[in-house]
Amino acid sequence: EARKAAEEAANAQANSAQNARTFQQEMFDKQRANQEPWRMAGVNALGEIQSGIQSGRFDLPKGEFNLEDDEEYQRRLREGNAFATSGMRHPLSAQQQQGMKEYNRGYATNELDNAYNRYIKKRNLSKASLDTSFNQLAVLAGIGQTATTQTAGNLQNLGASNTKYSTAIADAQSQGAY
């Protein structure tokens, strides 16, 4: 009679551990299914980011821009050249030549930026809108990464629980269950 009671107790313990393991697996599967839309949003966004970077979608167009076409640039260049050559009857001194080099270097840098900004403005292009598009996709990719990380953590917890319940089942079996 005591042996039968011990076997029944061991069977109950093993069944309880098996039920807990099954429940843990069901919970994991449910959590994974709940995370899947978020994970897929991240996967899709990451694909769009990669495609956008490769295609130049997030870049402002540069191929059409021609500095020589900018009227303001041409006007300022003419004024600068006229000023530099006005009243020149003798060759420039070394100091004057250095001054002209510095003027041209500064002029080229500033005017290139200014002309490009005018080009962008004239075509209603906006670096901010390109950045916004990229950033929105990056946020979605981050959400997907978070969902994947949470699923991995849940899987790790499931593994630990299954180990614990498998040990409990083995203990129960060693006591005469099953």
Image (cartoon, grey):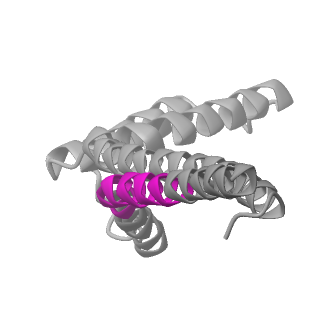
Which of 133 and 175 lies nearest the eye of the viewer? 175
Drawn side of residue 19 relative to residue 176, left or right: left
Number of callouts = 0
| Residue 99 in the image, given as x and y percentages of width and height | 71, 27
Which of 74 and 31 lies nearest the eye of the viewer? 31
Drawn side of residue 122 relative to residue 35, left or right: left
| Residue 132 in the image, given as x and y percentages of width and height | 30, 41
Residue located at (71% from left, 59% from top): 169
| 68 to 102, vertically: above or below | below
Residue located at (44% from left, 63% from top): 46
Residue located at (35% from left, 67% from top): 44
| 28 to 81, vertically: above or below | below
Residue located at (57% from left, 52% from top): 12
Drawn side of residue 24 relative to residue 47, left or right: right
Residue 36 in sight in this render: yes
Quadrant in the picture for residue 67: bottom left
Residue 57 in sight in this render: no
| 98 to 169, vertically: above or below | above
Drawn side of residue 121 relative to residue 161, left or right: left
| Residue 28 in the image, given as x and y percentages of width and height | 47, 55
User: Where, quadrant-wise, is the C terminus in this rendering?
Assistant: bottom right
Dominant SS type (magenta): helix
Q: Is residue 26 magenta?
A: yes
- Looking at the image, the residue that sits furthest to the front is 1
Quadrant in the picture for residue 48: bottom left
| 78 to 87, vertically: above or below | below
| Residue 1 in the image, given as x and y percentages of width and height | 68, 53
Q: Is residue 115 magenta?
A: no
Which of 71 and 99 lies nearest the eye of the viewer? 71
Which of 133 and 45 lies nearest the eye of the viewer? 45
Bounds of the magenta segment: 21-40
